[in-house]
Amino acid sequence: DLAQINNVKYGLLNADVWVAQVTVIIEKKIKEFELTAHRREAVKQSLQRMLEAFINAADAHMRKQARKGNWWKRTKGAMKQKIQDKLVDIEQIKAGIPEYADKILNEMSKPAGRRQIDGHLQGLIDEVSDSTFSVLDEGPLANLRSRYHCLEQLSCQHSINRQIARNHARAMRQVLMVLALTFVLITGVCAAPGTEGSKGRLVMLTLCCAALMLCGVLTPMIEVEARISELHIVLLGESVIFTDQVLYFQSKSVLDVAQVLTATGKPEMILVGVLVVVFSVIFPLAKLGAMLIYLYDLKGLRRAAITRFFAFQSGKWSMADVFVVAMLMAYVGFNGIISSQLSAFTAGGGEAVDVLTTNGTSLQIGFFMFLTFCLTSLLASSLIEARCETKAQVKNLPSAAA
């Protein structure tokens, strides 16, 4: 939810957000604009050029009228032009252009004139803002606001972060409790090898392995996140800031990955998804079941080849250890790739652009739970095999002595 509400498409890549920030900057610059001596001189020169061009255009238009139409219109136009040349001196009018420019600037500096100019510019800004928009589905954002009872993005972020902190603290307490119980069981089994009491402890250790395995495949194993913590752009001397812009985020468990693969509908992806479930869920569960069958010799199945295979040899085929190593390598690979790409993105900024990126790739609870399961199940199978072989040897001692 946090990655969704901070997605870059709702912030940095959203035209509406840019329009809102840039409009505020332009409005501020308009209100702060003052005709200082340096600015007045530059504006005056521009006004003088425009006034001179206007006078030249008007004079050219009047002279052009004397050469258009029939002979009567041309005669009247020529007479008007001669009278104009006698009464109006164009060069004298042009000589007064600096004075005209000063009067215009004086009118612009008056409060009434300033209000009219500001209002006209504000109208232009509003027109441009209304014509600039992005076609974006904000339905997911509305759903999140409704779910967390917040009206704006910032308050939603705070609510989600608080919920994440509470969930993480509760999950860590539960994980530490499970790991502590696992350690106690292992200590108890190892402290009383070959006794009748160890049989119940081995059963509890096997069930503990099942709990560890389920936690490993049901909870996220790796979290991949690439985020722009802060993007600072200087525009017209003002700051445009975007924070917590999520470029990419994924957090999935083993079963989530299998579901995504099978949902593609492609045969090769479905095959990979099935293999993931078989080697990560079915094989480990079969191994734990076979360990209990071997321990209690249910219906005389201890000597069955399939029982011994799943109890003591399936570890070579289930690839649990390979799976954990693959997850670790995936973490290292994702971490390196994202760090490299984000550093390149940061290096692309100029003096007016300051980018602070964050690589949030991290191993999650599921990875450590599954790793603990792999180690604990190997230890449990070894202890069960050693206990059963020891009891068998003890039973065979009287017959050997006889």
Image: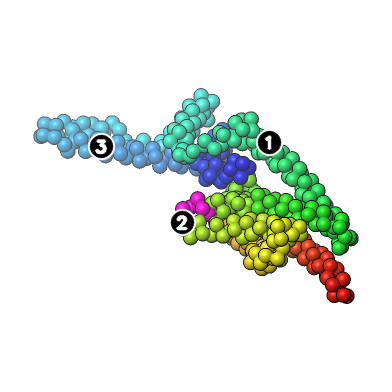
User: Gap between marks 2 and 1, in whole Å?
Assistant: 39 Å
Q: Mark 1 falls on what kind of element?
A: helix
Instruction: Please give the label number shown on residue 159.
Output: 1
Q: Is residue 264 above or below residue 151?
A: below
User: Residue 171 occupies which quadrant of the picture?
Assistant: top right
> Can residue 11 be seen from the camera position used here?
yes
Q: Which contiguous range is marked in magenta?
A: 261-265
Which x, y percent locates residue 167?
72, 42
Q: Residue furthest bottom?
A: 401
Q: Which label's residue is closer to the chain start, 3 or 1? A: 3
Which x, y percent locates residue 155?
66, 34
Is-magenta flag for residue 262?
yes
**Cβ–Cβ below 8 Å for labels 3 and 1?**
no
Q: Amino acid at mark 2?
A: Lys
Instruction: Please give the label number shown on residue 61.
Output: 3
Side of 74 relative to 324 (left or right): left
Q: Residue at position x 56%, y 42% from top?
A: 11
Q: Nearer the viewer, residue 110 or 203?
A: 203
Quarter of the image with the C terminus is: bottom right
Q: Mark 3 falls on what kind of element?
A: helix
Q: Residue at position x 78%, y 62% from top?
A: 384
Query: What residue is disc 2 on?
Result: 266
**Cβ–Cβ below 8 Å for labels 3 and 2?**
no
